[in-house]
């Protein structure tokens, strides 16, 4: 059952979100201009499905990949794309861009704050933006994402989540996720368990995903997803 703490919460209004977005992007661009040392990384993956917060985006196999540039002072920029089903975006493509800042308060406490634009280049009416943030305490992460004009101009949207990760042994790790969506378009919860390992230079992730709206079309209903990834 939903924790009543999450009811009727609005993280940021439209003006506040735009101000944060502008500040993050401006600071990141200034970092790039000053020529500070940066680390570039990439990834590519293929999955048996692609769920976003418990909602089926691909209705089957999905190919995805992205690139990140992390600066030594904590700022970062990146892009990520995935194939999606035509019901999500005419042309079947999602292409996201993001920028943010991450740092540590102590050896066990870290934080992250950023802006992301979810784009559908072949049908831009679905484009939307979010401001996000999180705090990690050792193996536990608590975070949020918020938008004043979410997917398909569906109105205000807030997302709250908690993640926990632990090593089972030297080979396997377990991830636990709980998320709560509070939006003008409707409220629901999503949850997942993930078993991860690495072999022959690849990452393997088997996830169980479900939602409180499992009786509705496109929402995860005890789904199992296998993803194979490669760091570049």
Image (cartoon, grey):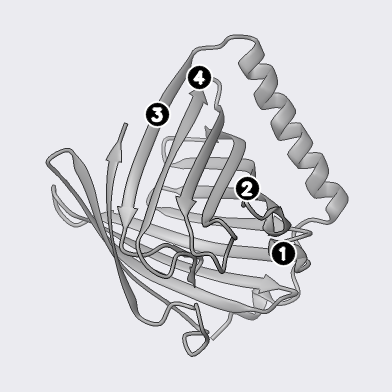
Disc sitting over residue 121 in the figure: 2
Q: Is residue 188 above or below residue 232?
A: below
Q: Is residue 172 left or right of residue 113?
A: left
Task: Please rate how many residues cluster around mark 1, counting C-alpha atoms within 10 Å: few if below 14, some from 14 to 19, many from 20.
Answer: few
Q: Mark 4 points at which residue?
A: 72
Q: Which residue was labeled with disc 1?
A: 152
- 25 versus 36 height, above or below: below
Query: Which of 78 and 86 lies nearest the eye of the viewer?
Result: 86
Q: Is residue 48 left or right of residue 65?
A: left
Residue contact at pointers 3 and 2, CB within 8 angstroms: no
Look at 69% across and 18% down and name the residue there: 30
* Secondary structure found at label 3: strand
Q: Where is residue 17 in the image (x, y as percent from the top left)?
A: 79, 48
Q: Would you say the residues marked 4 and 1 are in contact, meaning their CB atoms lie under 8 Å apart?
A: no
Report x, y in % for residue 103: 54, 33
- Please identify the quarter of the rendering in which residue 48 is found: bottom left
| Label whose residue precedes the other's in the sequence (4 or 1) | 4
Which residue is found at the position 14% from the left and 49% from the top? 171
* Front: mark 4 or 3: 3
Q: Is residue 114 above or below residue 227?
A: above
Q: Nearer the N terminus, badge 3 or badge 2?
A: 3
For the C terminus, the quadrant is top left
The local secondary structure at tag 1 comes to: helix
| Extreme residue toward the bottom, this view | 215
Q: How far apart are marks 3 and 2 (CA)?
A: 24 Å
In the current view of this chain or complex, which residue is farthest to the right?
15
């Amino acid at each position: 059952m939903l924790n009543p703490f999450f009811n009727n919460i609005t993280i940021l209004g439209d003006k506040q979100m735009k101000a944060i977005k502008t500040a993050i992007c401006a600071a990141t661009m200034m970092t790039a201009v000053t020529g500070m040392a940066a680390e570039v990384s990439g990834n590519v993956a293929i999955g048996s499905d692609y769920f976003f917060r418990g909602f089926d985006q691909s209705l089957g196999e999905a190919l995805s990949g992205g690139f990140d540039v992390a600066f030594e002072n904590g700022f970062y920029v990146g892009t990520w794309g995935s194939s999606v089903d035509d019901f999500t975006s005419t042309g079947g493509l999602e292409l996201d861009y993001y920028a943010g800042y991450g740092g540590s308060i102590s050896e066990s406490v870290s934080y992250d704050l950023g802006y992301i634009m979810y784009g559908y280049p072949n049908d831009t009416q679905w484009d939307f933006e979010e401001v996000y943030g999180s705090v990690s305490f050792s193996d536990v992460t608590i975070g949020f994402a918020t938008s004043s004009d979410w997917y398909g101009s569906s109105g205000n949207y807030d997302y709250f989540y908690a993640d926990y990760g632990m090593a089972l042994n030297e080979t396997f790790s377990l991830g636990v996720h709980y998320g709560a969506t509070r939006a003008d378009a409707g409220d629901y919860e999503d949850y997942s368990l993930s078993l991860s390992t690495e072999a022959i230079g690849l990452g393997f992730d088997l996830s169980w995903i479900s939602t409180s709206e499992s009786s509705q079309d496109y929402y995860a209903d005890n789904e199992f997803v296998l993803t194979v990834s490669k760091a570049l």
